[in-house]
């Protein structure tokens, strides 16, 4: 910067802040540092808004607004670890526009898309993270929404904030999915290996989903209270070694769920109190080897059950507890 530019900048500052600035001109290097702006990992494109550029990683989205993709991204070779894409701002919407973001890691712990801001929505595309140590998605913010996504990752997918929504999506997390409180999982296909879906907090809703799994210890684990588990389907052609629905919390409503195909060691293991089990079905399998061992298993007093159809070796096991039988419960098996 030449002397004329230095004088000009001094005059501008004087006009803004008073004549005292004119007596103390800012040095060229200092002025350049003040006006320098860091490049952002997006560009503005008509019709798309901010379009993400994932050429240089990691990427941080620290401004609210709408973001989009214009192409698929295969991020093989990223080796820094940590979060690949971070959303730290509130009120962010990312529309993948039907495109894919894929990453392949070897022995590096990393999350492909990590959210710490509130009210963040991600929709319409695919997030895929491979291999050991790689999580596709994780969030600590409140109000996270995943809509019409395909998500696949090796590590657990954790939504730690309240009021999360997963809808119309296919989620595969080998080591399970966790939601916290007042969250909704609906009309989605969820698959896993050892653990599927854990409800840690209260007031969640899990409605009209289909579950697939490997050698699961449990498919749905209800740790919190006052959750609604309704209209879900579990359909496998082999017996899982653990429990389909593990209900450890209190005052939960589990109704109109179906287990068909292969059974489980326990279809519904109810360890809490004040829970309602209504209209659930465990279908009797075509082969005796696929039969569920115990339909509904109670180990605490004070629950309610009615109109359940349990195709199991032991349809209802009260274990000496005291329950309210509303009637209509039918056991059948091989």
Image (tube, grey):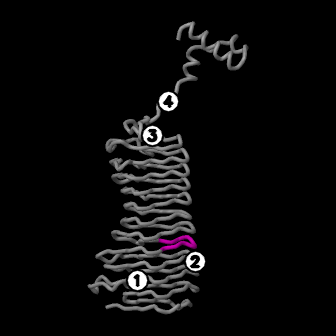
Residue 313: x, y in percent? 37, 89
**Mark 1: few/some/many CA within 10 Å (<14, 14-19, 20+):** many
**Image: 217 above or below 79:** below
Left or right of 34 on screen, residue 333: left
Which quarter of the rendering shows the C terminus?
A: bottom left
Q: Is 331 left or right of 334, judged from the image as shown? A: right
Residue at mark 1: 281
Residue indicated by mark 4: 38
Which residue is labeled 3 in the image?
Answer: 49
Sequence-first tag of 2 and 4? 4
Labels 1 & 3 near each other (Cβ < 8 A): no
Q: Are marks 3 and 2 in contact (CB under 8 Å)?
A: no
Point 53% across, 75% down: residue: 248
Kindly give the residue lying farthest to the top in the view shown. 3
Question: How far across and how far down the image is residue 166, in percent?
Answer: 46, 61
Q: Rate crowding at label 3 as few (under 14), some (14 to 19) or many (20 or more) other CA atoms within 10 Å.
A: some
User: Residue 230: percent from the left, percent from the top?
Assistant: 47, 75
The tag earlier along the polypeptide, 4 or 1, is: 4
Q: Start and end of the magenta stretch?
A: 221-229
The reply, left or right, for residue 220 in relation to residue 286 is right
Q: Nearer the viewer, mark 1 or mark 2?
A: 1
Is 46 drawn above or below residue 300 in the view shown? above
Q: Nearer the viewer, residue 112 or 79?
A: 112
């Amino acid at each position: 910067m030449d002397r004329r530019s230095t004088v000009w900048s001094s005059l501008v500052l004087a006009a803004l802040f008073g004549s005292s600035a004119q007596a103390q001109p800012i040095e060229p290097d200092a002025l350049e540092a003040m006006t320098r702006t860091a490049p952002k990992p997006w560009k503005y494109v008509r019709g798309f808004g901010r379009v993400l550029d994932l050429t240089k990683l990691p990427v941080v989205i620290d401004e609210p607004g709408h973001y989009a993709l214009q192409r698929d991204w295969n991020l093989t070779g990223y080796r820094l670890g940590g979060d690949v894409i971070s959303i730290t701002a509130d009120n962010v919407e990312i529309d993948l526009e039907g495109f894919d973001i894929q990453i392949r890691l070897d022995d590096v712990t990393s999350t492909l898309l990590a959210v710490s801001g509130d009210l963040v929505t991600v929709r319409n595309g695919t997030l895929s993270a491979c291999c050991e140590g790689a999580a596709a998605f994780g969030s600590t913010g409140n109000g996270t929404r995943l809509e019409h996504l395909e998500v696949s990752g090796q590590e657990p997918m954790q939504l730690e904030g309240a009021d999360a929504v997963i809808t119309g999506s296919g989620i595969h997390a080998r080591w399970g999915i966790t939601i916290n409180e007042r969250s909704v999982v609906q009309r989605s296909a969820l698959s896993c290996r050892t653990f599927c879906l854990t409800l840690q907090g209260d007031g969640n809703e899990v409605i009209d989903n289909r579950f697939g799994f490997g050698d699961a210890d449990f498919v749905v684990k209800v740790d919190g209270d006052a959750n609604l588990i309704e209209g879900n389907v579990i359909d496998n052609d082999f017996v899982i070694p653990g429990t389909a629905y593990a209900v450890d919390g209190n005052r939960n409503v589990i109704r109109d769920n179906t287990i068909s195909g292969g059974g489980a060691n326990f279809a519904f293991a109810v360890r809490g109190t004040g829970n309602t089990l209504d209209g659930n079905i465990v279908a009797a399998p075509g082969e005796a080897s696929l039969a569920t061992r115990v339909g509904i298993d109670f180990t605490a007093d004070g629950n309610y059950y009615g109109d359940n159809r349990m195709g199991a070796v032991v349809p209802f096991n009260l274990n000496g507890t005291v329950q309210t039988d509303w009637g209509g419960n039918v056991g059948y098996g091989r």
